[in-house]
Image: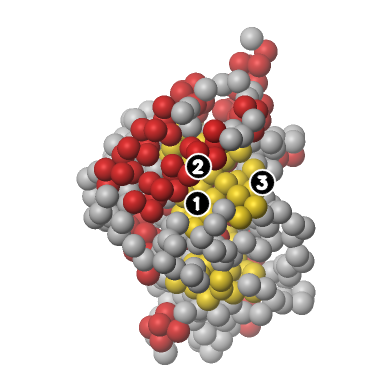
Amino acid sequence: MKMRFERLLIASIIFIGCSSCQGSNSVPVSSTPPVISTTDPTATPTPRPKLPQWFIDSLPKNIQTLEPYMDVRGFDLENYQKPVDRSLIETLWYDGATIWPSSVVSLANEVLDEGKNPGLGVRSLHAQGITGKGVSVAIIDQPLGLNHPEYKGKILLYKYFDPTDKNPQSDLHGPAVASLLVGTNTGTAPDAKLYYAAVPSASSDAQFLADGLNWIVDTNETLPKGERIRVVSVSSGPSGPGTPLTQNNNAWDAAYERATQAGILVLDCTKMHNIVDVCTLDLSDPENPSKCIPGWQGKEFSANPNKIYVPYSHRSFAETYQDGVYSYQYDGEGGLSWTLPFVTGVLAMGWQVNPNLTKDQMVELLFDSAYKNPKGVKIINPVAFIAKIKETVDQ
């Protein structure tokens, strides 16, 4: 099976939404989040998100049978007659534009709400005040609407890297990764400070990502020592074997080396540098790392001993294509893209506990603290990781 990351990357390259972001200059962003309705069907709902017309036109007009792992974003299933149970809903990809049969609306909302939980004990750490507070992190990804309540007020600086595009649109990928990292309800590090480099949604040129990373390094040089950016999440593979980007890959390599030399940890999906792979949570026991099965759709595969395995599916994240219309998507199948912000947030929590550790020390502790299954596969274990970080403070 091909990596779902490839599917998500292709989808995000061409999936252009309907709301304007900021222009091409660096934009300081800070304000109080607006009110958003919950998924409780009795609450006052926000308007249904307006999906791109080409996407709407591509939807089947008459769904005969829902299959596991189908993408049903925007589908009108109100008159769907066949049984729909929780086990099926947990595998689907749906959003605020999906219309459900009245008999399963509450169940779909329940699954979506549960998907906001990062799992693996992350919320137990938040309850202890370990939320990434005060730690600066960065993302390089596609444009996002800045006002979604999951992350509004948490993006300290935003810059879009295509001066020829005067009207960049919020898409699928940007709101997702931002909310998975710093989202109030969905993020692993909800109190981290985020710097965001936005790159075009429809480009095969790695130069945009390289420019974004160089901007992060330049910005870092202007920050006080205690506020410098520690780690960058890049849910893309801008260089090396298998990259879908075909231009200026060497520019990314140079920017990566520059950032590394500056002490910034860059987490990307290149085959040369990627340290993560995917594991499937057991939704009946989502806090237990021993229940996270390495592989796609819960089907175990031969694991790489040099990777740390991270939950990638059954997650909910921010959705916005139009300013003022804020909702969520639930992704039952997931992809490698969703692992990078998860790990970045876990690392941010670690730096909150001990800001004196280097990036190499952090990665070493991340692997040392991992749960090792009977085959020796390393599953990320945020609670054990923070425990090890605390030990370094006591030494």
Which residue lies under the disc numbered 3?
190
Q: Quadrant of the C terminus?
A: top right
- Estimate the spatial distance between the alpha carbons at disc 2 and disc 3, rounded to whole Å: 20 Å
Q: Identify the image's colour scheme: rainbow, by chain, secondary structure or one colour.
A: secondary structure
Is the residue 181 above or below the residue 276 in the image? below
Residue sitting at 58 percent across and 35 percent down?
A: 222
Three-letter residue code for mark 3: Pro
The answer to whether residue 210 is seen in the rendering is yes
Which residue lies under the disc numbered 2?
216
The answer to whether residue 295 is seen in the rendering is no
Residue sitting at 37 percent across and 37 percent down?
A: 256
Dot 2 or dot 1: first in sequence order is 1
Which element is circle 3 on? loop
Horizontal and vertical percent for residue 196? 54, 50
Q: Nearer the viewer, residue 250 or 288?
A: 250
Q: Is 23 situated left or right of 40 in this image?
A: left
- Estimate the spatial distance between the alpha carbons at disc 2 and disc 1, rounded to whole Å: 8 Å
Residue sitting at 54 percent across and 40 percent down?
A: 219
Horizontal and vertical percent for residue 174? 51, 59
Q: Nearer the viewer, residue 315 or 87?
A: 315
Dot 2 or dot 3: first in sequence order is 3
Q: Nearer the viewer, residue 352 or 98?
A: 352
Which residue lies under the disc numbered 1?
197
- Estimate the spatial distance between the alpha carbons at disc 1 and disc 3, rounded to whole Å: 19 Å
Residue sitting at 30 percent across and 59 percent down?
A: 204
The tag on residue 272 is none
Label 2 crowding class (10 Å Cα cut-off): few <14, some 14-19, many 20+?
many
Dot 1 or dot 3: first in sequence order is 3
Which element is circle 2 on? helix
